[in-house]
Image: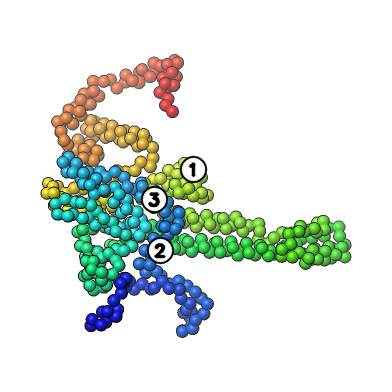
């Protein structure tokens, strides 16, 4: 038995994918059994080959690298403790600085966009406090699930062999309680690797390569072009018309491949290159379409990547809708990575330091629109919610929920503010402001007031 183990043991063996064809190039004609012809196609890549492909796309394509950098910088915002306990919130911020959470979170977001998943392992020397969080390359991580799709352990390559709890080079499987596991866009409940940001890039690059190949063929054909020659026969006898055609034939016959001399043909002769009128615009549109498809998968407005397409110079509403769609995508990324931290890391911190409650974290939303507009809208919403409570339409508990707090710190102070606002509404006449505006309606005071109130 040991002989067969030594025979088949390799230093870089990976688990075989289940029911996935290999990524080699084949030239098989399925219509005829065991007969090879020139029909060539590509088989599907297995998951591990796709990870290598995604890594290559990120490091070689400026468009892909720029997209990942933009998403990472927007999503990696300030950490917010979502707890009403000030001592726990203060300790969460201290731990986040100690483990260098901003850098670790950036690595997790970046790798989850490239490979579809990212894993970080927390390290504690004496199991009393967190020391650091290490993010190994996702391309070297394999997950071992059970039949229900629950992750049982993690293994870091190289040197993993199926059926053995220890890797060939001595690395043991990592328990899931030590891993901060981030999955981007899972397709099913059993999809524990997630979908990469570049999942459709292979097909898009293949389409772009076909367009470029067609352009090269046209350019090569124009190097030895085909001409369309038209001779105006108006006012010519049949003999003169035939003589003019023979002159044009003689001129083209004397033109060599490397001859740069101009063509001198009789008057009334029109010469055109076949296909030279429309191929440039047609291939430009096809190339722009492929680039649009790539950007649609990324979910980023083209202007942020310095890419110019036909829809880039659209109206303001188009740009605003693109920003809103990108904001939604970033919110989903922040929600998924916050859930990964809250699932394993913070519960373990609560056990180590004996916290009264389990810490829960979130992230501050990035400001993709103007800051003043967002703050003004937030203040107006609070004033409108407070007005509904003052008028008795809503209870005070509803106002607390709208603010985002779980309970009131000082219920007496809140009641006092509501009663004070009600008293001001009751004591102040409702029509005073309207009468004042009515008195100034036919004077220059109205214009002066309007001019002073205008803000640019």
Q: Which numbered disc flags the more N-terminal residue, 2 or 3?
A: 2
Tag nearer the camera, 2 or 1: 2
Q: CA distance from mark 2 to mark 3?
A: 18 Å
Q: Viewed as shown, does residue 250 lie left or right of 170?
A: right
- Pick the front one: 280 or 5: 5
Query: Is any part of residue 230 visible from this angle?
Result: yes
Q: Tell me if mark 1 has few (under 14), some (14-19) or many (20+) residues whose alpha carbon lies within 10 angstroms of its own.
A: few
Q: CA distance from mark 1 to mark 3?
A: 26 Å
- Pick the front one: 101 or 366: 101
Which image quadrant for residue 194?
bottom left
Residue 315 has which mark?
1
Q: Which residue is mark 3?
A: 69
Q: Residue at x 48, y 77 (%)?
A: 27
Tag nearer the camera, 1 or 3: 3
Image quadrant in which the C terminus is located: top left
Q: Residue at x 43, y 55 (%)?
A: 64
The number of numbered badges drawn on the structure is 3
Residue 371 has which mark?
none
Q: Which numbered disc flags the more N-terminal residue, 2 or 1?
A: 2
**Circles 2 and 1: CB atoms closer than 8 Å:** no
Q: Which residue is mark 2?
A: 53
Q: Tell me if mark 3 has few (under 14), some (14-19) or many (20+) residues whose alpha carbon lies within 10 angstroms of its own.
A: some
Q: Tell me if mark 2 has few (under 14), some (14-19) or many (20+) residues whose alpha carbon lies within 10 angstroms of its own.
A: some
The image shows residue 363, relative to residue 135, as above or below, that is above
Query: Is any part of residue 148 visible from this angle?
Result: no
Which image quadrant for residue 247?
bottom right
Q: Viewed as shown, does residue 48 lie left or right of 339?
A: right
Percent position of residue 416, x then y? 17, 28
The image shows residue 146, relative to residue 439, as above or below, that is below
Q: CA distance from mark 2 to mark 1?
A: 37 Å
Image quadrant in which the N terminus is located: bottom left
Q: Which numbered disc flags the more N-terminal residue, 1 or 3?
A: 3
């Amino acid at each position: 038995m040991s002989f067969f183990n030594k025979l088949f043991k390799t230093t870089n063996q990976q688990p075989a994918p289940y029911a996935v064809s290999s990524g080699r190039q084949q030239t098989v004609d399925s219509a005829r059994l065991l007969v090879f012809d020139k029909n060539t196609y590509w088989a599907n890549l297995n998951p591990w080959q796709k990870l290598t492909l995604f890594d290559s796309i990120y490091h070689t394509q400026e468009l892909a690298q720029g997209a990942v950098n933009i998403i990472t910088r927007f999503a990696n915002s300030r950490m917010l403790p979502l707890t009403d306990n000030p001592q726990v919130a203060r300790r969460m911020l201290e731990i986040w600085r100690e483990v260098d959470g901003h850098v670790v979170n950036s690595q997790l977001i970046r790798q989850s966009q490239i490979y579809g998943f990212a894993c970080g392992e927390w390290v504690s020397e004496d199991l009393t406090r967190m020391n650091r969080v290490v993010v190994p390359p996702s391309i070297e991580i394999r997950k071992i699930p059970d039949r229900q799709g629950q992750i049982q352990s993690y293994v870091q390559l190289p040197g993993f062999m199926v059926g053995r709890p220890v890797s060939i080079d001595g690395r043991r499987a990592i328990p899931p309680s030590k891993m901060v596991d981030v999955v981007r866009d899972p397709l099913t409940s059993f999809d524990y690797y997630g979908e990469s940001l570049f999942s459709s890039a292979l097909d898009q690059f293949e389409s772009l390569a076909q367009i470029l190949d067609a352009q090269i063929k046209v350019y090569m054909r124009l190097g030895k072009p085909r001409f369309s020659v038209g001779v105006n026969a108006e006012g010519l006898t049949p003999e003169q018309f035939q003589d003019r055609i023979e002159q044009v034939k003689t001129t083209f016959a004397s033109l060599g491949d490397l001859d740069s001399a101009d063509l001198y043909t009789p008057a009334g002769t029109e010469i055109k290159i076949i296909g030279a009128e429309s191929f440039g615009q047609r291939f430009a549109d096809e190339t722009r379409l492929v680039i649009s498809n790539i950007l649609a998968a990324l979910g980023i407005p083209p202007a942020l990547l310095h890419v110019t397409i036909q829809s880039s110079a659209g109206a303001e509403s188009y740009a605003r809708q693109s920003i809103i769609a990108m904001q939604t995508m970033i919110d989903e990324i922040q929600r998924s990575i916050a859930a990964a931290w809250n699932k394993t890391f913070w519960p373990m911190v609560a056990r180590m330091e004996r916290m009264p409650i389990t810490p829960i974290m979130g992230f501050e939303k990035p400001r993709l629109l103007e800051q003043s507009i967002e703050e003004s809208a937030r203040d107006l919403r609070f004033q409108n919610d407070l007005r509904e409570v003052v008028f008795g339409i809503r209870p005070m508990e509803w106002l607390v929920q709208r603010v985002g707090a779980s309970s009131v710190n000082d219920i007496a102070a809140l009641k006092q503010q509501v009663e004070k606002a009600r008293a001001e509404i009751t004591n102040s006449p409702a029509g005073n402001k309207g009468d004042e505006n009515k008195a100034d309606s036919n004077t220059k005071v109205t214009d002066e007031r309007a001019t002073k109130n205008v803000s640019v």
